[in-house]
Image (spheres, helix red, strand yellow):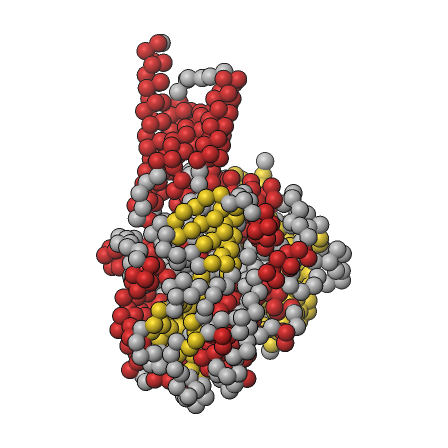
């Protein structure tokens, strides 16, 4: 007996050592991928945290064998997801962003590739193995002793995290950092954000009175009107430019360099100290086009607030250039519906707005949109079309290929061994070809080109690398490379372009231009989307407020914003500390409204049987204790009998629910709403509306969405049609599954959640679906049918089968005559039993017509027996 006990002890120890080592390997993998040394404190925290996991799994295995299997799912996902996020954004996840997992566009893009698949597999096998070992061994601790051990492990983790975990992921355990950041965010909800008027007063402190023309011009513009081209590169930091690193005397052999600009080096102006003010594309674009700071926290982006405000009060770059006779266009590789960039770009003055649908081929399939080579090649065609109109133009291009998980050919991955590096190299080659084509076309003679980034995906060993932006200007007016040594940011782009286009009319504008050299210092603000905020009023000195409201002062060793070494120490200055707290936590909208308009009036083209996203990715702040109502008017243009559209709404607040509505010829226009109660204030609320149509004649149908709003009033609207709400986790229990079916062969959905069948051709499937999850068990399928014209009772009417795995696994099937159905008044009821020995993720119910039928399928449901 003693021998067996000792054997079990050694097996548990051996398995535990394997698990701790596999857990630690994750840190070595991510550190290697980032090209930095492994931090010893981080390793110690990983060991202690992995021991805590082991005791938790062991303790729960003593309670019930299934509990540890349930526990390993969130534990493993948190660890592996953090590795992906660190790889992409140089930061750990904040659980406040959990709503992203409900966003289809985000999931499609993010999980189109996993960066460390082998390690993910090994980690899952290892953690399952340790649970199997724990479940099979007979060792036990008393409940009291186990609890004490777990509490000691947890306490040691918290103590180590508090005293030794720094602001960077490499100095702390990934999962603990996520939990800690999330607890801080929750804690702050119970603290006052201060007087909003004081926040505005502090904001006034950073408003400069400097005029654009106070600076000395760095080069002479030609008098001829110039075209303006903005090439905005997804997530690219300035560290990828060799000249920038040389200027700061930084040597980083691990960084892939953008060498494509070497060919135009003598005609460029570079801004090494260029800052992005936040870490979200829509916020970066807002600052670029408005000359204003974005929100410095994660509350509703100003782009949405702009759409609700008096737009004449806010200067926008496209509108300003239109006044001077410019044609304007915004072209991006990603879908326009995400973050409503289609509506925002139109509102600020872009004549032409093109998204991913404008790119008909891709060299690299990618969930986020067109890869960089595809995008830049085809964008040249659009630029040439605009140029042929004979007016000066301003075109803005936004790439997406360097967004995680990166659009890159496999040969590049094999060459560079790292997807991010490979994606940057692929962007570099794509830019090189774009520059060559641009020069050969002759467009370079009359165009000012600004290459910049929308945000930064981070730079290792830089305390605010997540705000290191990229800015390089290309123009034949520049005769020799110029380095502008000042500190600039996204908000300076508007003044810069207007200063270049017409220096005289923009000379008295407040602010700075990157085309001028200024004496003296100006303040600048920047922040991350993860709770850090920075303020600098002198180049090389930055005040930093972290997530726990600790104030630091960071000084570079070279007097620049970026350097090899920094001196960082805690700083006692209540005025600056309060100033940054106000700026970070102040969430009041810039305009006073209870109703936010998401879409004014938009016509959407639907292709037969294809899903189109109407809107997505709003990232709104929802006030507390409010009924929230999403409402819109719709109209299907030129619909015919037999046409139908299924509208679906999903949101991040009510995960697990899906909301559908069928509209047909009889209900081709009307209003829809979706309402829920929001108890606590919520940042980054996202909802997505999708439309999928089936049309009898036309392959393309137009759906008009009018007045799509989100309302924060206290009372609910009434008398308007609502979405039908389903719990997708238990959809098999739904009283009517018809909204989730597909139709063909003269059958179609109608607005009462029925299916009409009219003069079908025989021996063809009429309906199929719903492709949903069913647990194992015995069921009865029930289909309720009403005949509009009574069929031939002597012949078989239709065949019903129940299947999975694309119809290859049949659970039951039966042909039905009238005599095989029961009757309730004028409704005929089909019942068919089926048995699922295992759970099924894609159950399919099919009905095939065996004679001409004119009928209405009123209901389809399944009942689990026992």
Q: Position of residue 516 (x, y in %)?
A: 43, 74
Q: Nearer the viewer, residue 772 or 669?
A: 669
Q: Which residue is rendered at x = 46% and y = 17% of the image?
A: 141
Q: Nearer the viewer, residue 665 or 472?
A: 472
Q: Is residue 472 above or below residue 98?
A: below
Res. 236 in view: no
Q: Which residue is most to the top?
A: 1
Position of 854 with respect to 377 (left or right) is right
Position of 591 with respect to 362 (left or right) is right
Q: Which residue is rendered at x = 60% and y = 41% of the image?
A: 187
Q: Position of residue 820 (x, y in %)?
A: 58, 51
Position of 406 with respect to 184 (left or right) is left
Q: Nearer the viewer, residue 794 or 69?
A: 69
Q: Which residue is most to the bottom?
A: 390
Q: Considering the image in quadrants, where does the N terminus appear? A: top left
Res. 59 in view: yes
Q: Nearer the viewer, residue 288 or 115?
A: 288
Q: Which residue is rendered at x = 65% and y = 44% of the image?
A: 191
Give the quarter of the image for residue 216: bottom left
Q: Is residue 21 above or below residue 360?
A: above
Q: Which residue is rendered at x = 49% and y = 71% of the image?
A: 512
Q: Position of residue 215 (x, y in %)?
A: 46, 74
């Amino acid at each position: 007996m003693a021998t067996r006990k000792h054997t079990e002890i050694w097996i548990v120890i051996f398995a535990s050592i394997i698990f701790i080592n596999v857990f630690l390997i994750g840190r070595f993998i991510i550190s290697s991928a980032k090209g930095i040394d492994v931090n010893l404190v981080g390793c110690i925290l990983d060991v202690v945290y992995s021991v805590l996991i082991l005791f938790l799994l062991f303790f729960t295995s003593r309670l019930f064998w299934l509990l540890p299997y349930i526990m390993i799912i969130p534990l493993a996902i948190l660890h592996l997801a953090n590795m992906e996020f660190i790889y992409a954004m140089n930061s750990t996840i904040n659980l406040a962003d959990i709503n992203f997992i409900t966003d289809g566009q985000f999931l499609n893009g993010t999980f189109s590739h996993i960066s460390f698949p082998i390690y993910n597999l090994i980690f899952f096998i290892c953690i399952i193995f340790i649970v199997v070992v724990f479940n099979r061994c007979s060792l036990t601790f008393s409940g009291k002793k186990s609890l004490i051990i777990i509490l000691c492990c947890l306490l040691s983790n918290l103590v180590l995290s508090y005293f030794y975990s720094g602001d960077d992921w490499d100095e702390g355990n990934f999962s603990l950092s996520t939990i800690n950041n999330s607890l801080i965010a929750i804690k702050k909800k119970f603290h006052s954000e201060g007087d909003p008027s004081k926040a505005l007063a502090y904001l006034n402190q950073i408003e400069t009175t400097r005029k654009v023309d106070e600076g000395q011009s760095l080069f002479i513009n030609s008098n001829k009107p110039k075209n303006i081209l903005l090439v905005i590169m997804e997530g690219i930091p300035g560290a990828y430019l060799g000249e920038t690193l040389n200027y700061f005397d930084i040597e980083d052999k691990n960084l892939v360099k953008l060498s494509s600009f070497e060919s135009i080096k003598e005609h460029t102006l570079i801004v090494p100290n260029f800052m992005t003010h936040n870490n979200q594309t829509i916020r970066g674009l807002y600052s670029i086009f408005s000359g204003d700071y974005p929100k410095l926290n994660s509350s509703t982006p100003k782009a949405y607030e702009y759409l609700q405000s008096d737009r004449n009060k806010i200067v926008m770059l496209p509108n300003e250039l239109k006044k001077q006779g410019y044609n304007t266009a915004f072209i991006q590789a990603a879908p326009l519906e995400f973050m409503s960039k289609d509506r925002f770009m139109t509102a600020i003055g872009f004549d032409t707005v093109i998204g991913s649908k404008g790119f008909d081929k891709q060299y690299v399939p990618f969930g986020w949109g067109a890869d960089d080579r595809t995008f830049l090649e085809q964008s040249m065609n659009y630029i040439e079309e605009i140029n042929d109109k004979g007016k000066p133009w301003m075109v803005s291009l936004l790439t997406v290929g360097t967004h995680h998980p990166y659009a890159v050919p496999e040969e590049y991955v094999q060459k560079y061994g790292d997807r991010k590096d490979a994606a940057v190299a692929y962007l570099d080659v794509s830019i090189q070809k774009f520059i060559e084509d641009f020069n050969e076309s002759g467009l370079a003679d009359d165009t000012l080109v600004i290459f910049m980034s929308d945000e930064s995906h981070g730079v290792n060993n830089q305390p605010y690398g997540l705000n290191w932006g990229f800015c390089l200007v290309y123009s034949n007016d520049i005769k020799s490379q110029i380095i502008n040594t000042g500190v600039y940011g996204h908000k300076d782009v508007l003044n810069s372009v207007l200063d270049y286009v017409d220096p005289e009319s923009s000379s008295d504008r407040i602010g700075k231009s990157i085309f001028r050299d200024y004496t003296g210092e100006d303040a600048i603000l920047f922040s991350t989307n993860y709770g850090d905020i920075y303020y600098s009023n002198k180049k090389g000195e930055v005040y930093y407020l972290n997530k726990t409201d600790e104030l630091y002062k960071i000084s570079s060793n070279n007097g620049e914003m970026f350097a090899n070494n920094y001196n960082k120490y805690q700083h006692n200055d209540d005025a600056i500390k309060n100033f940054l707290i106000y700026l970070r936590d102040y969430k009041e909208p810039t305009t006073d409204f209870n109703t936010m308009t998401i879409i004014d009036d938009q016509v959407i083209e639907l292709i037969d049987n294809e899903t189109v996203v109407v809107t997505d990715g709003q990232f709104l702040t929802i006030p507390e204790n409010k009924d929230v109502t999403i409402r819109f008017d719709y109209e299907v243009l030129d619909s015919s009998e037999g046409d139908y559209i299924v509208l679906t709404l999903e949101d991040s607040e009510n995960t697990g629910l899906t909301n559908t509505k069928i509209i047909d010829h009889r209900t081709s226009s009307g209003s829809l709403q979706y309402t829920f109660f929001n108890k606590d204030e919520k940042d980054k609320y996202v909802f997505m509306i999708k439309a999928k149509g089936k049309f009898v004649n036309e392959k393309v149908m137009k759906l008009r969405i009018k007045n799509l709003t989100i309302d924060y009033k206290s009372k609910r609207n009434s008398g308007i049609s609502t979405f039908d709400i389903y719990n997708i986790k238990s959809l098999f229990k739904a009283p009517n599954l018809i909204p989730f079916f597909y139709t063909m062969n003269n059958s179609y959905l109608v607005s009462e959640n029925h299916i009409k069948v009219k003069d079908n051709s025989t021996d063809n499937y009429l309906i199929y679906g719903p492709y949903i999850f069913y647990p194992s068990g015995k069921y009865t399928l029930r289909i309720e049918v009403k005949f509009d014209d009574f069929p031939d009772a002597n012949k078989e009417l239709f065949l019903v089968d129940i299947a999975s795995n694309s119809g290859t696994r049949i659970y039951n099937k039966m042909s039905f005559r009238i005599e095989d159905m029961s009757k309730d008044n004028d409704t005929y009821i089909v019942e068919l039993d089926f048995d699922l020995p295992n759970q099924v993720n894609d159950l399919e119910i099919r009905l095939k017509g065996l004679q001409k039928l004119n009928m209405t399928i009123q209901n389809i449901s399944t009942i689990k027996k026992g």
